[in-house]
Amino acid sequence: MTATTPPAGFSPSPSRRQLNGISEIRTFFRTNQQPIYFVGPTAFNLLGIDRWVRNFQYIAYYDSWDGQHPRVFAPENRPYVEFESSEQINNYLLRDAEVREHLRRRGGVPMIAMVFFDEETEQICRELGYNLILPPDSLRRRLDSKIVTTQLGNEAGAPSAPNVLGEAASYAELVALATAAELGSDLVVQTPYGDSGKTTFFITSERDWDSCAAELIGQQLKVMRRINNKAAAVEACITRHGTIVGPFMTDLTGYPELTPYKGGWCGNDLFPEALSETDRATAISLVRKLGSRLAQEGYKGFLEIDVLVDLDTGAVYLGELNPRISGVSSMTNVTAGAYADVPLFLFHLLEFMDVDYMIDVEEINERWRELAAVDVWSQLIMKEPGDAVERILAAPRTGAWHLTDGGTLTFDRVSNDWHEITGENEAFFMRVYPPGDFRFHGADLGILVTKGRMQTADGLTDRCRRYIEGIRAHYQSEVVPDVPAVMPIAYVK
């Protein structure tokens, strides 16, 4: 493998080990002595990375395996807390006495990764002597803005769909903005922060404006021409040698069987035709351009990017940026590219570990582009669509499940992750809430990962519906007369 020349100003420390190529990187992680932890409400996002990285563990609030996963730790004493965000759950875990004792017993300076964090997380890690292996919260929050993403993408030569940035206090002002930018009257309007399923508004009339005006007035807005598009999600990793781009996958959004939120993300399909060869090449170029621009801002490591293909013109546009580990990491890290080299997340680890390494980014990106022609995976993010609050009496077990020829879904065996799934009639289900907890509007019930596609141009496949119906059939619950204050766990991308 030909090594990429390090960027100007980079000089290896004489005391640091240098890894040359994928083979040495793979060996390095297989013999790793540094304790590394993923902290989260569940172990979902990076589940399976422990297959690649020795001394990698998961610290979770909800133990989906009821103590049977050898590398998942959850505190036993969990008093009722009205969490309002995943950040609060993560901060609670870091401060928890059982968690702190577990990390102390294992020794070393813990390296901590997570999806959602904030300034408080950074302060906790400083106080406890933990190494938070993520870009600074201040940088992440700035880049998380859809407005900033658009501006940086334009500077990098990775444009968004035709748009204009500005503010509007009335429908007339919105129309004036759109008219000046020649966007027409069929508009898509986004606010800077939040899940696109909840902060994206489709406006064609003053009535549409009135229905969401309270969400838009006083905000900086991204006003776009509505295009007939196909969306694809991809994760990438910004390294000192360039940006490595993972496989592209389509989103499942808004299906009422899976989510109560119109436009809400509820799964993904990863398959060769997610993008054409031409569109994939263009999209990879856009992602790498944006990656280079983000690197100038000081960002490094993992991120997720959405791209849009205009089906009428063939143009490929930058969509949104999620500067974090994301909800599609589960599929990125199990692809043929991951097994040919190493999972994408391991390049993130290299950027934060005391090690120098040399890789050929061009070669890796080319090989992963070619291997995209053989991968087919899918996942369902199953939320509770009903309005009632019910106490769970029985819930499907975490592990491997089998779909019979007759369409019945049965539990097959306990399993630590989905990496051993090989066929379309077997799936891995990871439960979130155990018996005794609650199901409620928007609650994350679990995640199902399998081979094959869950969605076509006509909607959910019949097999997908059998999986959904099969999992739901294994829940038993009772209505709660005195409704407690509860908050869904966020699996926002």
Image (cartoon, grey):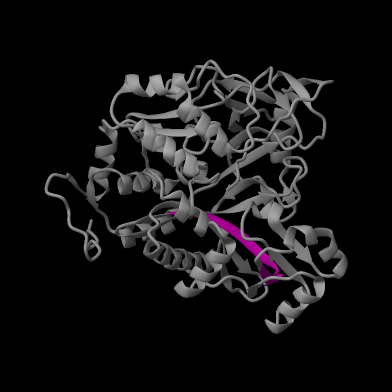
The N terminus lies in which quarter of the figure? bottom left
Spot the residue most to the left. Answer: 14
Figure quadrant of residue 399: top right
Figure quadrant of residue 177: bottom right
For the point 76% across and 63% down, the residue is: 202
In the displayed structure, does residue 443 sit left or right of residue 133? right
Please name whichever residue, 144 or 17, is drawn nearer the observer in this view of the structure.
144
Please name whichever residue, 85 or 438, is drawn nearer the observer in this view of the structure.
85
In percent of width and height, residue 316 lies at: 56, 70
In percent of width and height, residue 396 lies at: 66, 23
Task: Examine the structure image and report whether residue 80 is included in the region drawn in magenta.
Answer: no
In the displayed structure, does residue 207 sit left or right of residue 40? right
Spot the residue most to the right. Answer: 207
For the point 61% across and 47% down, the residue is: 268
Residue interval drawn in magenta: 222-236
In the displayed structure, does residue 184 sit left or right of residue 402? right
For the point 57% across and 19% down, the residue is: 78
Figure quadrant of residue 182: bottom right
In the displayed structure, does residue 62 sit left or right of residue 226? left
Q: Is residue 223 above or below residue 379?
A: below
In percent of width and height, residue 368 lies at: 40, 55
For the point 33% across and 62% down, the residue is: 362
Please name whichever residue, 120 or 114, is drawn nearer the observer in this view of the structure.
120
In percent of width and height, residue 255 lies at: 74, 46
Q: Main secondary structure of the magenta part?
A: strand
